[in-house]
Every structure is written in structure tokens, then in C-alpha cells.
Image (tube, rainbow, N blue to C red):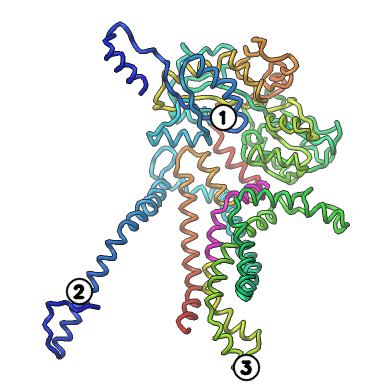
């Protein structure tokens, strides 16, 4: 860092103090300049995120007559279906996130261990569906899973089952469809973080007598946790707001929060009714993210700093 | 805009005072409807002939329903001059004051059911909710009435009803209770809910869109369902093994309104008058299965005799069906829908 030209250049304690002060002033000026650079994007975030969310909160406080009231929130407790929808939403989110971890972790691990060329070919198979429309993929699953769909016809033809399995138009259909769509969101960050794990650490572990299982469990797995945590958070939060797949695959039996929002917005003549649903989801999601951060984040950062 | 330009050209030409710009020619109005094949039919039946006759331009847009109109009107950003809605949405929007008053000096209301003629909205076409069943499962001995649909012993099979249109499902539930078609309205909501309660354990899917209802029946995911007649007609045309009739159908009307603050109200009024006229109304069933709202359309001779029996609003078919009461649902929709959801999502 450059020293200010007007500084007196005497040595000793006083001079050092002066120097420190000048450096501090310099640093302050620098951060102000950075802030100025940031201000357009900060303004954008404020204008298109903070203001509308504030407005959403504000709208949720008014009833159909336009009077200030808690009616929009009281409804959640008066009508049993809201709580049911809420529970369903989180249940689906937990199941789908769990399924994504179970399927995604081994996949990402395999990808990270493959030679570069093979890995990039396999990655294409992860990314290609990612680029296909959610609607198309959901309908494809419907064709595969429904009563007279591919799986059931095969199994019946092979004599494995006599009655078709109930795979679509229920919870299992929703979970299968959503897991498929959300899997890349877990695999990609996880793969990226696994690739950054220093193989020397693994070799060192082996050198000190750890077998492959112990190396994985004590070294690789903890080091992959930050990537896993970010993947889990992305998948979980996306689950909470999912609309298309549960609407098409749930057969009207799996009503998730986003579907409820759409319905409520058209049922009630005040925006507050739908806004309140948005506020509740936002608050609960933020609370859960905080909890995630506290549980996984603390551990993950601990791992990083010990590295 | 066009009009001001033509005025200034006239002024420059020195032809003042005596010549006024033509009242309508050159105006542009925007009409919003539901999109898809239905709106394509409306374009051919209503919009194009009207634009030609009045010398105006009709632009088209699509709507999601009442919330779109509410958003435009309350936000002072009205894009549409005319928009289509479901009749119960018209009744609710009217209560909220979202529409312009209609001028029945310009719009001729004769031939339209008085229940669909209001200060600020008018009917435009009919859709029926009908009972459809697969003939590869039941032959021609399938369920014919809603009581049959509710009879799970006599008619075992997989079933679907509408989960998104509580009004329609409650209407058919009332019919299943044995209530005659002329006594369904006003709906005894608690009675209808009890009826839904009896069947809900046997419902394999609660559909939320017309396309979904169609897909469920087409792919054999269910053996019987409630469905909109337009979708049922499409399945029949595609050769699917299905059967349906208008017996105990629920006739629901669509309506048109001029959103409050529409920019070309005068031209919109004249266009709307054309849309509901018997001549243009008679065009609609030539392109789509939604029946005309103006019964004089059947007297124009435009609709072929063998087509009349397939049209849900022909005088013969109207007698077999329940007309869904928009005013009733305006006042009861919210409460009934919440109760319905509580029951169905248990």
C-alpha cells in the first residue's frame, strides 16, 4: 500500500502512529470508493428485492374491506387445509432433499474420481436434462409412471406384478419427478467442491496407515461437507417453492404451498390473502436457513479453517 | 392516435367544420380471452368478422382470469378493452366495481338468458361439465348419472373430479344426492359437501386443469371423470374409447366485460354488441364445442341440423342441464371453496 506523500518521514513511535492513522484513512477511503462502485447493484437489490418484499408484508396486513387486520394470517388456523398444505410442502421438501443426497453424493463422488475426459462426458448427462424444460420432463415422467405407463406395463408383462403400482398422481410421483429435476442442483456444487479437495491430504492419510474407508470417512467426507451443505440448501429451498411437478404429478392430492398461493390469489379479492402465504413461507424458510447455517455451516467452516 | 392524425390532415386540407372524422374506422381495441383452440375459434367466429364489419383493428391477448383484470384496474394500467371471464368471476368483479357499465342501447340482449345479462357484464358462450366414461371398460353400460358415478359397488373403477373448480364439483355432488336439476340452485353447500365426503375416498385424481382431465381419461389413468364438454369432444374426435352426454350436465357460462378505465370504450361497446349478435354467435359452434349464449343463433340457419344435437346450449340440450348460478357463487364461493379444500385435502 502506498504511503501518503505529505506524511512527515521521521522515525520512532510517533511516526509509526502517524503512519497507522494515514493507512487507516487510506483504507477507509478505499472502502468508500468500493461502496460507490457497489451502489448501483445495491440500489438494484433494494429496488427489486427489498421494496417488493416490504410491500408484500404491508399488503398481507389488510383484509378484503381494506382495513388493517390479521384475518389473512388467522385463516391458516381456521381452515385446516392450510396447515395440511404447509406440512405437505415441508414433508415433500425433506423427502426430495434426502433422495437427492442419497443419489447425488455417490454420483458426485464417482464423477470426481473419474479421469477428466470420462468425467466431462458423464457431466453432460447431468447437465443435459438440466437444460430441458421442467414441463417436458414432468410429462415424460407421467408417461413412464402412470397406470398404463412404461414401468407398469413392463412389470405386468414380465409377470412381476398383477395390479399396476400407484406411481403417479400421488406423493411418490411428486417425489420421483422433483428428485429428477433437482438432482443437478445438488450434484454440481458438490462435484465442484469435491474437485477442490487436495489429494495430498488423502495420500497423507493413507501414508499414516488409514485404510480406504477410514480415509474417506475421516478426510474426504468432512472436506466435502461445505459443498454438500450448499447443495442441500439450494435443493431444499427450491423444493419449498415448487409448482409445476406437484401440480401435474400429484393428481390434486399433493397440494404444495406455491399451488395454494396461486389458488388463494384468485379466490380472494385482496392481494393480502396470497401475500400472507408468501410472508409465512419466506419467514419459515429464512428461519430454517438460519438453522442450517448454524448446524452445517459452523461445522463446515470449522473444517475449512482447520485445513 | 390514428384519429388525431386524420383530424390534423383534414385541418391542413382546409376541410374544417363540415367533415368530422369517421366515428370508428381506424380504432384499435384489444380483446383478451383464454387462448388455445377456444380463442382461435373466437377469432374466426367473432373477432375477425367484427373487425371487418366495423373497420377497426382487434388485437388479441390472453388472460388468466379475474386476478389479471383486478391487477390492471387497481393498478391503473388497463391494457384490454374487452376481456372474457367465467360468469362467477364476472359476478365477483362486478361486486368489486372492476367493470364499465354496458350500454344495452347498443348491445341487443334479446335471446340471451336474463341471468347472464347484467349492468356491467354479459354472457358470451357456454361450457358444460359432463360425465365421461371409458367404453373399453364399461361398454355402453357405463355410469349415466352422477348418482351412478357415486355408486362404487355397481360401477367399480377409477374416478377423477375437479379439485380446482369447487363450484362445479359441488354442483355435481348435489345432483348425486338425487336433487333434481331445477332444484340444485341455491346449492345446499353442507349437503353437497357431505356428498363429496362419501366419494372422496374413491377419487384417484382431483384434476386442476382441462388438459389434465383430458389426459387422465385418455391414458386410462381413470375410467370415469367429470370433464368439460369441449375436452370430451376433442377426445371423441381423436378416437378415444369414451362416451358422454349432456344429461345432468352443469352448464357454466363465460362472459365478457369492459374493464374499468378501458381506453376505447365506445369501440369496445360496438364490438361487444357484434360478438353477442345471433349472426356471429352462430359462427362459434362451427369451430368449437362451446355453445352460443344467444339462443337466436339457432334460428339463423347457419348451424347445420346434425350439429345442433352436439351443442351444449341448443334448446334441446339446455333442458337436460343445470345452469350454474353466477350470483350464488359470487356470494358463496370463498366459504364453499375453503370448506371443500378442507374436506378434500384431509
Q: Nearer the viewer, residue B262 or B38?
A: B38
Instruction: Quickly name the residue at label 2.
Output: A25
Q: Position of residue A291 (x, y in %)?
A: 49, 68
Residue drawn 83% across the image and 34% down it = B135
Crowding at label 2, few (<14), some or many (≥20) Cα neighbours within 10 Å?
few
How would you classify the magenta stretch by its main secondary structure? Answer: helix
Taking B35 as reference, is A179 above or below it?
A: below
State the extent of the magenta-drawn residues as a range: A232-253
Would residue B194 be seen by someone viewing this image from the given angle?
no
User: Few, some or many C-alpha atoms within 10 Å of disc 3 (few <14, some 14-19, many ≥20)?
Assistant: few
Q: Quadrant of residue A32?
A: bottom left
User: Does B141 sit left or right of A186 as displayed?
Assistant: right
Q: Which mark is residue B86?
A: 1
Q: Are marks 1 and 2 in contact (CB under 8 Å)?
A: no
Q: CA distance from mark 1 to mark 2?
A: 67 Å
Q: Chain of mark 2?
A: A
* Between B337 and A207, the one nearer to me in the picture: A207
Amino acid at each position: 500500500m502506498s504511503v501518503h506523500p505529505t506524511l512527515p518521514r521521521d522515525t520512532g513511535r510517533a511516526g509509526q502512529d502517524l503512519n497507522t492513522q494515514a493507512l487507516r484513512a487510506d483504507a477507509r477511503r478505499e472502502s468508500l470508493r468500493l461502496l460507490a462502485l457497489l451502489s448501483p447493484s445495491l440500489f438494484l437489490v433494494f429496488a427489486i428485492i427489498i421494496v417488493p418484499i416490504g410491500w408484500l408484508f404491508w399488503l398481507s396486513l389488510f383484509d378484503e374491506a381494506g382495513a388493517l387486520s390479521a384475518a389473512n394470517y388467522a385463516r391458516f388456523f381456521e381452515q385446516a387445509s392450510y396447515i395440511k398444505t404447509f406440512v405437505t410442502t415441508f414433508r415433500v421438501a425433506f423427502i426430495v432433499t434426502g433422495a437427492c443426497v442419497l443419489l447425488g453424493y455417490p454420483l458426485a463422488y464417482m464423477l470426481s474420481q473419474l479421469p477428466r475426459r470420462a468425467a466431462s462426458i458423464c457431466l453432460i448427462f447431468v447437465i443435459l436434462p438440466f437444460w430441458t424444460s421442467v414441463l417436458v420432463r414432468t410429462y415424460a415422467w407421467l408417461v413412464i409412471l402412470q397406470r398404463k405407463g412404461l414401468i407398469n406395463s413392463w412389470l405386468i408383462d414380465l409377470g412381476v406384478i398383477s395390479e399396476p403400482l400407484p406411481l403417479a398422481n400421488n406423493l411418490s410421483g411428486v417425489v420421483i419427478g422433483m428428485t429428477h429435476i433437482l438432482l443437478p442442483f445438488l450434484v454440481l456444487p458438490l462435484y465442484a467442491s469435491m474437485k477442490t479437495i487436495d489429494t495430498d491430504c488423502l495420500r497423507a492419510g493413507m501414508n499414516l496407515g488409514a485404510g480406504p474407508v477410514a480415509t474417506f470417512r475421516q478426510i474426504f467426507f468432512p472436506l466435502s461437507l461445505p459443498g454438500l451443505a450448499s447443495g442441500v440448501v439450494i435443493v431444499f429451498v427450491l423444493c419449498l417453492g415448487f409448482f409445476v411437478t406437484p401440480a401435474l404429478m400429484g393428481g390434486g392430492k399433493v397440494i404444495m404451498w406455491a399451488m395454494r398461493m396461486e389458488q388463494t390469489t384468485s379466490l380472494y379479492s385482496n392481494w393480502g390473502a396470497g401475500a400472507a402465504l408468501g410472508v409465512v413461507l419466506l419467514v419459515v424458510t429464512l428461519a430454517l436457513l438460519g438453522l442450517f447455517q448454524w448446524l452445517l455451516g459452523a461445522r463446515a467452516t470449522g473444517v475449512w479453517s482447520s485445513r | 392516435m390514428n384519429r388525431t392524425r386524420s383530424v390534423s390532415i383534414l385541418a391542413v386540407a382546409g376541410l374544417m367544420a363540415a367533415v368530422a372524422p369517421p366515428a370508428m374506422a381506424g380504432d384499435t381495441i384489444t380483446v383478451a380471452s383464454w387462448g388455445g383452440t377456444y380463442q382461435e375459434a373466437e377469432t374466426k367466429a367473432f373477432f375477425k368478422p367484427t373487425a371487418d364489419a366495423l373497420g377497426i383493428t382487434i388485437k388479441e391477448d390472453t388472460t388468466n382470469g379475474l386476478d389479471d383484470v383486478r391487477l390492471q384496474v387497481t393498478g391503473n394500467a388497463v391494457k384490454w378493452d374487452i376481456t372474457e371471464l367465467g360468469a362467477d368471476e364476472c359476478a365477483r368483479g362486478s361486486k368489486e366495481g372492476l367493470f364499465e357499465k354496458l350500454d344495452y342501447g347498443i348491445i341487443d340482449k334479446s335471446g340471451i338468458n336474463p341471468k347472464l345479462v347484467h349492468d356491467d357484464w354479459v354472457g358470451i358462450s357456454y361450457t358444460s361439465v359432463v360425465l365421461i366414461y371409458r367404453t373399453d371398460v364399461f361398454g355402453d353400460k357405463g355410469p349415466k348419472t352422477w348418482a351412478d358415478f357415486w355408486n362404487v359397488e355397481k360401477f367399480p373403477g377409477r374416478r377423477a373430479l375437479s379439485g380446482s373448480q369447487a363450484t362445479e364439483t359441488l354442483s355435481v355432488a348435489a345432483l348425486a344426492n338425487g336433487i333434481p336439476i331445477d332444484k340444485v340452485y341455491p346449492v345446499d353447500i353442507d349437503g353437497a359437501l357431505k356428498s363429496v365426503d362419501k366419494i372422496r375416498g374413491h377419487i384417484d385424481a382431483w384434476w386442476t386443469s382441462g388438459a389434465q382431465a383430458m389426459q387422465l381419461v385418455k391414458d386410462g389413468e381413470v375410467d370415469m371423470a367429470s370433464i368439460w364438454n369441449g375436452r370430451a369432444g376433442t377426445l371423441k374426435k381423436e378416437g378415444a374409447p369414451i362416451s358422454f352426454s349432456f344429461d345432468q350436465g352443469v352448464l357454466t357460462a363465460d362472459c365478457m366485460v369492459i374493464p374499468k378505465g378501458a381506453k376505447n370504450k365506445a369501440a369496445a361497446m360496438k364490438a361487444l354488441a357484434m360478438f353477442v349478435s345471433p349472426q356471429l354467435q352462430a359462427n362459434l359452434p362451427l369451430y368449437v364445442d362451446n355453445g352460443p349464449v344467444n339462443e337466436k343463433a339457432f334460428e339463423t340457419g347457419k348451424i347445420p341440423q346434425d350439429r345442433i344435437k352436439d351443442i351444449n346450449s341448443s334448446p334441446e340440450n339446455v333442458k337436460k342441464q343445470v345452469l350454474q348460478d353466477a350470483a350464488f357463487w359470487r356470494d358463496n364461493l370463498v366459504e364453499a371453496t375453503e370448506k371443500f379444500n378442507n374436506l378434500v385435502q384431509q
